[in-house]
Image (spheres, rainbow, N blue to C red):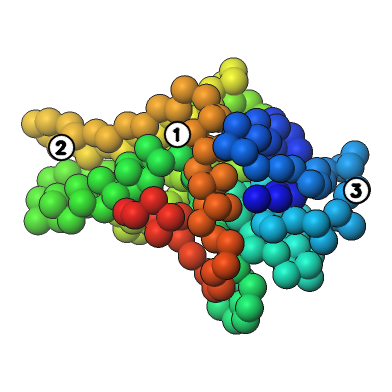
Amino acid sequence: MKIALIGYGKMGHMIEQMALSRGHDIVARIDLDRNEWDKLKEADVAIEFTTPMTAKDNILRAWEYHLPVVSGTTGWGVEPLKTGLGDNALIWSSNYSIGVNILFALNKQLTALIKPYPQYTPSITETHHIHKLDKPSGTAKTLAQQIGDNVPIESIREGEIPGIHTVTWDSDVDTISLTHSAKSRAGFALGAVLAAEWIIGRKGYHDFSEVIGL
């Protein structure tokens, strides 16, 4: 598989390492210092991890080369791109970690189980490295949307923490919590490459849960 990397920061470098370890080739690397858009004609798929300000334009430009796109950029509105894709293909996820997507599935289940018990109040805490641009994280927003309206989210930025997300249901007598703690970016990179492998030959919008069968 020939991959175009749109965004070549820390995440892009990690995806490159993961892709190479799985026998794939990187044919284009695009960021502020690398303008290799013309090389997209050599690619089979594009993986896009950039900024909220540029994500939409990057995806549309990749589609001009008829490439399926795997996007992991958070903090922007992906909804308008989910319909009317025609022959184009897109996977977008707030988090490509398999573990986080298991957390999403458990969060849905726990929310349904706890619904008859209004004495429990939900909240979310997310902690990330100081370089993360969006606050709260896309993962925390997804968790909150699964629970319902007005779920409070505490965002902490410190050090080089890859990502910790905790959903807490608190009552006067006990506390229930779900936590995912990433040890590195490797889990995110693996998920993005798995998504790229899966999307080739498909059309339309797909969720990462389809890729991993959740």
Q: Cα distance, mark 3 to mark 2? A: 54 Å
Q: Nearer the viewer, mark 3 or mark 2?
A: 3
Q: Nearer the viewer, mark 3 or mark 1?
A: 3
Q: Which residue is labeled 3 in the image?
A: 35
Which quadrant would the C terminus be assigned to in this image? bottom left
Q: Is residue 44 left or right of residue 41?
A: left
Q: Cα distance, mark 3 to mark 1? A: 34 Å
Element assignment for label 1: strand
Proximity of marks 3 and 1: CB atoms separated by less than 8 Å: no
Q: Mark 1 or 2 closer to N-term?
A: 1
| Amino acid type indicated by mark 1 | Glu
Answer above or below: position of 10 versus 35. Answer: above
Q: Please report the residue visible at 88 percent of the width from the left and 49 percent of the height from the top.
A: 36
Proximity of marks 3 and 2: CB atoms separated by less than 8 Å: no
Q: Please report the residue visible at 50 percent of the width from the left and 43 percent of the height from the top.
A: 191
Q: Where does the image place residue 89, in percent across and percent down from the top left? A: 60, 68
Q: Mark 3 or 1 closer to N-term?
A: 3
Which of 100/3 is in front?
3
> How would you rate the neighbour count of disc 2 (Cα within 10 Å): few for under 14, some for 14-19, many for 20 or more?
some
Element assignment for label 2: loop
